[in-house]
Image (cartoon, rainbow, N blue to C red):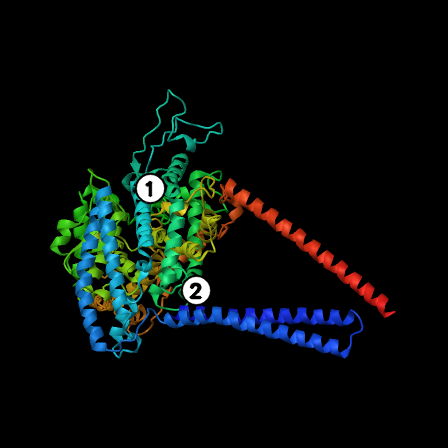
Amino acid sequence: MVASRVVGVVMGVACVVAGVVLAVVMLVLFSNNKKETEEGGIMSGRQKQLLADMASRRMVVVMTCVVVLLVLVGVPVGVQSAIFSDKGTEGTNTNEAEAIDFLGRYDREAGQMCNKFMEASWNYNTNVTDFNKRVMLQQQMIWSDFHRTKWNEATNFAWKNFTTPTVRRMFSFLTVLGKAALPRDKLKELTGLLQEMKTTYSVAKICRYDARLRRLPSGDYDYDAEFEADDDNQIGCIPTLPLEPHLTQMMANSRDPDELRYLWRAWREAAGKPIRQKYLRFVELSNEAARLNGFSDAGEYWRSDYEIDGFREEVEELWQKLSPLYQQLHAYVRAKLVEKYGEEVVPRRGPIPAHLLGNMWAQTWTNVLDITIPYPGRTSVDVTNALRIQGYSPLAMFRLAEEFFTSLGLEPMPQTFWQRSMIQKPTDREVVCHASAWDFCNGRDYRIKQCTEVTMEHLVTTHHEMGHIQYDLLYRNQPFIFRDGANPGFHEAVGDVLALSASTPRHLQSVGLLGNVDDSYETDINFLFAMALDKIAFLPFGYLMDQWRWEVFSGDTTSSNLNNRWWELRLGVQGVSPPVPRTEEDFDPGAKFHVPANVPYVRYFVSFVVQFQFHAELCKAAGHEGPLHRCDIYRSVKAGRLLRNVLSLGKSRPWTEALSVLTSGRTNKLDVEPILEYFGPLRTWLESQNRGELIGWRENEAIVLQVTRSNASLITGAVLAVIALVLLVALVIIAFRRCRRGGNKNFNTASQGS
């Protein structure tokens, strides 16, 4: 891998620089020593010669040490760089025909092994019991052992010099072992920690908010007392409210700041805080696994999925181009929230309190459309009421989404999909409700797990998850190794691309969910604003989640500032603040599913960019004329054919080539221009509405400022400060004594000379 090569070079250069600096320092010291000795008195020629010989011998010793240092440090670095100079390791077997035969056997066996693991994982996620957890972990260890065995076989081949590019690409994936590189005991510990964190999140519940009880003298709710009785005569509450659907609905519908603040805080107490120590250990093990694969840390390992150098910098550049649009949206929504709640709840020029945006994580803001909509009374694309009035069930919503895909000439869902998917939350058992699409690795069995509610938001989610299945279906004829998205963001984008069309007023009218739709300016702005509350509001959250995790993996963010750094990013990048004080004893990132489940998140940021690139190209294929935001590719077989051509590649080609196929060779890079074009009319409108408003936010004007340090952190800081002070005093004393000694020596020399 190029990144590993760069690391090797940098470390080698560092060794050389360190050696040179050491040599220079020693030369200066020896030179001063020689000078002082010569100035110490009158020496004979023989004495001077002896002194020169001693200095020469010392210099030889110094240079020898430097050479040894470079050999001991530089050689292993060079070896590491050579082994991992490209993705994966290789051996000495040059027989390409034998390698191809190995790949064929791997393909058959991997599908069978993967299927067994997926079945066990499905059973646990749709029925959270200790028994199912044990079976899943056992199967995961078997799956990991299989990977290790095949890795050992694959790394016998000198595959980097094979003539067939596809074969080389297969080996480049097979010869990176992933977490299975860990010793068996540590692998078992890592998988156990992952499941424990996911279980904590999935079964977390909180108590119901009761504004009449447990009030503090200040009038605020007593957050620390909701789980315990205050005295023998009061019965403590029993937590009964899970995230789905209860807390999600409450965060979406409540307009009581006290209740929202309570829900926000209580969920983090139940889901995030308990996994803090487990997560820190999980990071250690994940980093160890990454290093065994030749990466500097788990963050670099994650980024390697994108197969380009400078991916982190590219994402940063994309965000900088999108940030001005987000800031305009932020300023407008903040002003509307000030109108609703007043400046004592929402600061006019500060960050927005995170509990007021209709979502547990403030990642999307669609649920505050009712209090922020630009033109009330005009057409709105929230068809939740229409879905309910017309008697839509979760099954009917899935059928509606499927019909969109088939109208493009794409694949219908297999019969097993309808028989085995979980599209509603069961009432008789605990399940992991987070929506997800499942490929059971046999080319026949595909399922979705989703606790579907009859809402517009869940209709979009249904398209999104079915998009994953559509991608799985279209690359199912690829070898097992290539049955994946061109990059993780591509997989996330597919369903959303179709939702861009399925959400347009004209399309919703065509399927009977909206009445008469006019093409007025006000309708356009309402539609674009509603889309922006989903798409644009999400961008900073999608960007910063993995910025935080990459820093944790690299060690730039440590256990002493885990939560503090999270809120620095939330404040600085997203402009939202916690509604209650936070400390390092809290673990707010852990209250978001993707952290305890260890699902990389930057894929969603990438998908939100690339889906608009897809949308623009599919609209061209469909022959659309007019503004991009009005395009609906429904029933366009030409658009479906283009989408099939791109998706059927799977991971057989780098994503840059897949993007080149999509754009007919015009570009192979991520590009924000389509998303900016799509929201162009809204941006102009926002700029006109925001005259007189601060664009951006003043962090120091947050109603509740960012994290306060815990006592442990304060004590640690105090101890470090004392140690630093002691060292400083010691250095001053040493310097003073050296000066005195030097002064006495000069005085004695002067006396002897006279």
Q: Residue furthest top?
A: 233
Mark 1 surroundings within 10 Å by alpha-carbon count, few (fewer than 14), some (14 through 19), many (20 or more): some
Image location of residue 445, percent across then percent down: 15, 56
Asked whether, in this view, residue 486 is left or right of residue 67, the answer is left
Q: Quadrant of residue 353?
A: top left
Picture quadrant where residue 146 is located: bottom left
The furthest residue to the right: 754
Pick the residue in front: 80 or 482: 80
- Residue 510 visible? The answer is no
Residue 143 horizontal side relative to residue 307, left or right: left
Please, what is the three-letter code of the amino acid marked with disc 1?
Ala
**Quadrant where the C terminus lies?**
bottom right
| Disc 2 element | helix
In the rendering, at what x and y percent does residue 491 appear?
27, 60
**Residue at the spot of label 2:** 313
Question: Where is residue 396 drawn, in percent x and y?
Answer: 16, 48
